[in-house]
Amino acid sequence: MLAATAFYEDPLTLFLVGLGLMILFFWYFATEIERRKRNVGTVLLLGVVGLCMLAATPPSKRLKGGIDILGGSSFSLRVQPRENEDGTSSPPTTEQVEQAINVLRKRLDNTGTNEAQITRQGVDRIQVQMPGVSEQESKAIRETIEKVAKLELREVSPRNDEVGADGKTLAQRVADGNEIVPGYRVYIYTNKDRDGNETKQPLLLNRRVALSGSDIVSAFPSPQQSDAVGVTLNNAGADKMIALTKDMRLGVDRIATVLDGEVLNAPVVNARLGKNFEISGLHSAGEPKALSDALMNPLENPLIVEASSTVSAAYGSAVIQQAIWAGVVGLSITFLFVLIYYRMAGIIAIVGLVVNGIILFGIMAMFGFPFSLPGIAGMILTIGMAVDANVLIYERLREEMAAGKSLKAAIGTAYDKAFTAIFDSNFTSLITAIILFWLASGTIKGFAVTLTIGLLASMFSAILVTRVLFRWGVDLNLLKKLSFLSLIPPTKIDFLGKRKIAFVASAVLLIVCFAGFYIKRDRALGVDFTGGAVVQFQLEKGEAIPMGDINASLEKVALTKEAFPTEETSAATGVLLSIRCDVADSEKIINQLRQDIPTLAERAPETTAEDGTVTPGGYVVSASTEEVSALIGGTFLKQSLIALGMGLIGIFIYILFRFEFAFAIGGFVSTIHDVVLTVGLVVLFGSELSLLHVGAILTVAGYSLNDTIVIYDRIRERLLIETLSIKDIMNEAINATLARTILTAGTTIITVIIIFFKGGPALEGFALTILIGLIVGTISSVFVAAPIVLWWSGRKGGNLRSHVIKAKEVEVLTDAK
């Protein structure tokens, strides 16, 4: 185990192994020799699986849970007043607190691997919660939080080293209080050499800041010098730097770099400086990287960490166990169905799905990505798409065997024909995932990470793993004949003939949903969106209240919005019970908890005044209430909506490139339709939208798009070879993919239904959203996406077939070149 750990801590070894696997990957697809393709694929499969199994072993140590699943650490921060140029200070404004929250989110979770939850409490306090943080990590995070990164460049007085009659420099005399130099003040410069030896030297610096951090465009560890940070200024900053250095005596005058009031260095100016310069003298390990990150996200106001504690999982261990159990049962039923329906081929599909899971868990462990519930939503989507890829291949295989082809030829043709549908459906979802990771933040970024890894694993397992296993089975004569169940007979339903009824029904549902949302307004949004209050009870050291008792008590309260209890444990103060709720519910929650839980109802002894008046004692455990900001703040929500919008535009462009404009319009409109209708129906059924629903809604968008692309691919294929009317061809294509649609949606719906009924109350809303979205997305692929293509293509006498044929000819010519 020590060897495995050391292996992943060595970036060079990891890079070389990855490079070797990538070479095998390209070799596999480049070679045309079947036996070589089989052997290279086998080595690649074993290499990837072995690498990922090592990375995820042991799971208890290598896999990282999100704060909603395993809990983590909590930091209570206070925003400090900002010091003005004249020496006075100003209390923090609301805008400055929000700026601090945005900066912290970028510093602590810029890569999406931490999923930090950051909220405002009261006027000038901020709470930061991060998953599974160790004591050493906690110390590093504290330093990251408290680093203001206020960078200043100040001129060192030309008289700094001027020696007086007493033998002391001017800077030393000012430091001792024996002399005053107007316009200058003394800073103590602690110079540390590479051996760690320190020398302290007073520096007389100009009170006027020549250049500040607001002038910085980028900061990065210098590739030429290990103890330096390269800085690039904007145009205004470059002008200031030129003005600062143009009259300086080269080789004599100095400039000091001051960070958060401490002098980092004070080098002699040897050249006229402009847009680029370096900050050197950073000898501690990791200091250049930490400084460059901080300079890119400077704070306007200092922050101090008032307290740190351990926070319980947002959903409790019992809920998580229920969810895991429900997920395992659901997946087991899916595996069993695939095995029974596809028999021997089903075994190969299950092996591919297991490899898919190993790759997903291995990469998540390798790069330290946490598993949160929105991330698990991404896993559900990718597993569903992996099952769908196998169903697509096997239904194609059924068709090819029915056409009289040999098993080997049928397998090859099935994989070739299914490849475009698998690739296009996965790649469109991958576009969304990459854009979400790029533009969004927090748990949305976590969803994007899991989805990206899962999609790549899904394509690898479906296209390569199962294909290699089939090659071995045929070559070793282990597979001579395949037989499948056929529960869904061929159909000839006129789906497009019912498009007007479908459009009317969809329009009515959308109107009802919009009306319901308008009537409910804020009541449709949970405290994750609207913010509210946090009720807190500080228990005595050694005391604890089971979370089950808290939840049972909260169920008795007629709440305006759903409440979320958590516990924070501190070695110094004990357990802090916190309930995030709507402001109007805070008093009701306090009263109900005191009524149901003896620890909170305990009072101090009553007192008797001299006149005999008896005063009841106060509660031993006091309660406090203060305002708390939304988990999904304005900036977070705006970033997520922009990311989703950009993702849809990216998908539109890709479908336009791969198919035709009418298909792009249909895919774009149907995806928006499904997201809006799912959200509306969830609210209509009485659920409040929370952070948990965001991951579920993104999952719905992915499923909807996957279904649509599969149908589009079959329509395009039929248009190239058949001469029937466009409507008849589209009906034929939908009927041809109907078995695959029912099988894929059905197996996933079974899993989600089990999570809904057995996953616990906290996951009901999550499962309900995905369940509604699956049904809506499956229906809309047939009755919204396809009819829009037919309608758009028929506008002004357009000919969809000629456009598709022309696009195919261009594709063939491009491949030939």
Image (cartoon, rainbow, N blue to C red):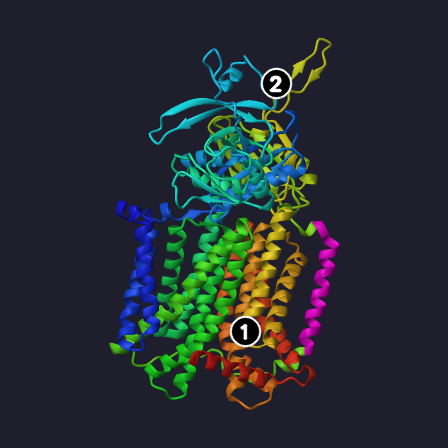
| Residue identified by numbered label 1 | 657
Q: Foreground: 798 or 728?
A: 798
Question: Residue 290: x and y, percent?
Answer: 46, 39
Q: Foreground: 491 or 141?
A: 141
Please tell me how many numbered marks the rendered image carries: 2
Q: Judge from the rendering whether residue 684 lies leftward or rightward of residue 358; answer left or right.
A: right
Of the image marks 1 and 2, the number of the one nearer the N terminus: 2
Question: Residue 479: x and y, percent?
Answer: 29, 78
Is residue 178 rendered magenta in the image?
Answer: no
Q: Foreground: 168 or 76?
A: 168
Marking on residue 605: 2
When asked about the image quadrant of residue 436, the answer is bottom right
Q: Which residues are magenta?
A: 500-522
At 66% from the left and 83% from the top, the residue drawn is 794
Element assignment for label 1 = helix
When asked about the image quadrant of residue 666, the answer is bottom right
Q: Is residue 45 above or below residue 308?
A: below
| Residues at marks 1 and 2 touching, judged by CB atoms closer than 8 Å | no
Question: Residue 761: x and y, percent?
Answer: 56, 50
Is residue 506 rendered magenta in the image?
Answer: yes
Q: Foreground: 549 or 206?
A: 206
Residue 759 seen in this snapshot: no
Q: Amino acid at mark 1?
A: Phe
Q: CA distance from mark 1 to mark 2?
A: 78 Å
Question: Residue 353: x and y, percent?
Answer: 39, 64
Single out the mark in the foreground, 1 or 2.
Answer: 1
Secondary structure character of the magenta stretch overall: helix
Residue 432 seen in this snapshot: yes
